[in-house]
Image (cartoon, rainbow, N blue to C red):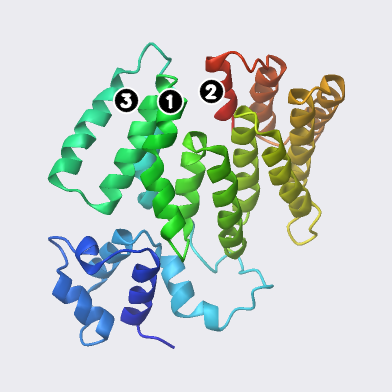
């Protein structure tokens, strides 16, 4: 079994991060190098800080440190096996999402623009890898609220390049993709979706992340239908079909969601009456089962689908962000 430093080195390299990029005023390059080489250890606070610097949760780290040598990939972890995803890693992105959700273009976009200006100054002062990812994300968010979809796809390229370069995806990378889907070109959505699904297979064992693959499917599907790339959306839907028919992954909520997605695709591709029937059947099942929150999630989506108008840019932006 490798030392803690060796595992850290492996994960850092898999993220494409150099020692200089990970080091800061709390932990120097020399200290990290000695830790990786096994010639010194770190205190808990410094160790946790370094994990945050490479976007890795403690549960992920100790999976790679110990569990991967002992756990059968076909056996789920029990409820006590691992912690929930570390929301600390993605809090800055959630803050931007909250600002965008409050915006009502062309009104009330000032907070997004102000955040963009503050972050630009921070990036000039500290051009860290994380700040550069955040800058790309907030730039694309600002583009989106101004309905400039082509520029959003250009501004998000640093995120695309980062996700393409990382060998060992973790929770941070999967959620970064989910948050960025609306900005990506359709071909990047599908390519990175496939890569994320391969990584998300590992996370089906984590008690709070076992449904990550379903969420990836739903969000990628909604973006691709919004972009009118129906063949690619159908490919994602086929993956969802396989998941809901897998007895080890079966969950009635996602089976009903899968039915809704089939109706959604039918509506936007011309089979409107057939699609409406499937969507309404899905909503009826949710009401019968009294599944908390799901009917509230899908009903507004259904109302937007019925107003489907590919010539209305604002409506299409809403369609892209329905997931």
Q: Secondary structure at mark 1?
A: helix
Above or below, 182 against 195 in this view is above
Graded by Cα atoms within 10 Å as few (under 14), some (14 to 19) or many (20 or more), the crowding at tag 3 reads many
Name which residue lies at 24% across and 66% down: 45
Circle nearer the N terminus (2, 3):
3
- Give left or right: position of 131 versus 282: left
Graded by Cα atoms within 10 Å as few (under 14), some (14 to 19) or many (20 or more), the crowding at tag 2 reads many
> At which x and y percent is residue 204?
62, 61
Task: Check if mark 1's residue and mark 2's residue have beta carbons within 8 Å.
Answer: yes
Query: According to the image, label 3 marks what residue?
Result: 112
> At which x and y percent is residue 266?
80, 28
Q: Nearer the viewer, mark 2 or mark 3?
A: 2
- Give left or right: position of 69 versus 133: right
> At which x and y percent is residue 250?
77, 54
Query: According to the image, label 1 marks what residue?
Result: 144
**Which quadrant, please, contains the C terminus?**
top right
Above or below, 86 against 277 in this view is below
Circle nearer the N terminus (1, 3):
3
Residue 208 visible here: no
Name which residue lies at 51% across and 44% down: 178
- Give left or right: position of 26 versus 72: left
Residue 302 visible here: yes
> At which x and y percent is residue 8?
34, 74
* Front-lying residue, 294 or 133: 133
Quarter holding residue 166: bottom left
Circle nearer the N terminus (1, 2):
1
Q: Secondary structure at mark 2?
A: helix
Q: CA distance from mark 2 to mark 3?
A: 17 Å
Graded by Cα atoms within 10 Å as few (under 14), some (14 to 19) or many (20 or more), the crowding at tag 1 reads many
Query: According to the image, label 2 marks what residue?
Result: 317
* Front-lying residue, 235 or 32: 235
């Amino acid at each position: 079994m490798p030392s803690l430093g060796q595992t850290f080195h492996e994960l850092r390299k898999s993220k494409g991060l150099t020692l200089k990029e990970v080091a800061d005023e709390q932990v120097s390059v020399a200290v990290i190098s000695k830790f990786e080489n096994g010639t010194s250890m770190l205190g808990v606070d410094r160790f946790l800080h370094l994990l945050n610097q490479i976007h890795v949760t403690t549960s992920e780290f100790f999976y790679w440190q110990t569990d991967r040598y002992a756990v059968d990939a076909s056996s789920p972890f029990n409820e006590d096996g691992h912690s929930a995803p570390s929301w600390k890693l993605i809090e800055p992105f959630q803050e931007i999402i909250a600002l965008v959700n409050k915006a009502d273009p062309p009104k009330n976009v000032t907070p997004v623009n102000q955040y963009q200006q503050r972050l630009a100054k921070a990036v000039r002062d500290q051009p860290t890898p994380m700040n550069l990812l955040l800058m790309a994300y907030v730039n694309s968010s600002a583009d989106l609220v101004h309905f400039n979809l082509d520029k959003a796809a250009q501004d998000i390229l640093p995120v695309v390049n980062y996700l393409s370069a990382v060998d060992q995806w973790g929770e941070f990378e999967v959620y970064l993709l989910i948050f960025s889907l609306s900005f990506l070109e359709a071909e990047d959505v599908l390519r990175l979706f496939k890569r994320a699904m391969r990584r998300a297979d590992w996370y089906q064992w984590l008690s709070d992340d076992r449904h990550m693959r379903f969420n990836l499917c739903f969000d990628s599907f909604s973006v691709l239908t919004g972009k009118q790339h129906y063949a690619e959306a159908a490919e994602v839907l086929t993956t969802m079909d396989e998941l809901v028919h897998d007895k080890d992954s079966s969950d009635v909520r996602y089976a009903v969601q899968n039915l809704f997605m089939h109706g959604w695709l039918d509506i936007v591709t011309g089979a409107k009456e057939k699609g409406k029937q499937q969507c309404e059947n899905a909503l009826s099942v949710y009401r019968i089962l009294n599944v908390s929150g799901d009917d509230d999630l899908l009903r507004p989506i259904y109302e937007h689908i019925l107003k489907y108008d590919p010539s209305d840019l604002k409506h299409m932006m809403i369609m892209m962000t329905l997931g």
